[in-house]
Image: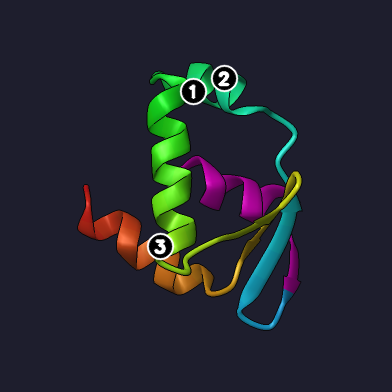
Amino acid sequence: MHLLRLAEECGKRDGTSVDFELKENNEELAARVGTVRELISRNLGRLHGDGLIEMRRRIVRIPNVQRLAEEVRSHD
């Protein structure tokens, strides 16, 4: 998943959480991963609703990287 890759490449760790800046908007993110903006918006909303990510403006926090990675693997 692109968010996990960004977290690893440019995130700042604090215990189990990682913060990083998402420099792309949803349209650009969709183009990068080969989907449409609506799916990006829906999936980011689901991840946020499930407590797997937190977003404040362009800053993304993954409270528990391992938990998000497990969720991604369960949907592959």
Work out whether 20 lies above or below 35.
below
**Residue found 22% across the figure and 59% down from its top:** 74
Residue 16 in the figure: left or right of residue 1: right
Give residue 69's mark. 3
Marks 1 and 3, the one that precedes in the sequence: 1
Judge the density around disc 1: few (<14), some (14-19), many (≥20) Cα neighbours within 10 Å. Answer: some
Q: Chief secondary structure of the magenta span?
A: helix
Residue 10 in the figure: left or right of residue 69: right
Measured from the top left, where is residue 4 in percent x and y?
53, 52
Work out whether 20 lies above or below 12.
above
Position of the N terminus, as image quadrant, is: top left
Q: Quadrant of residue 15?
A: bottom right
Measured from the top left, where is residue 49 in percent x and y?
43, 62
Q: What stretch is highlighted in magenta?
A: 1-13
Measured from the top left, where is residue 45 in percent x and y?
46, 49
Amino acid carrying mark 2 in the image: Glu
Give residue 27's mark. 2
Amino acid carrying mark 3 in the image: Ala
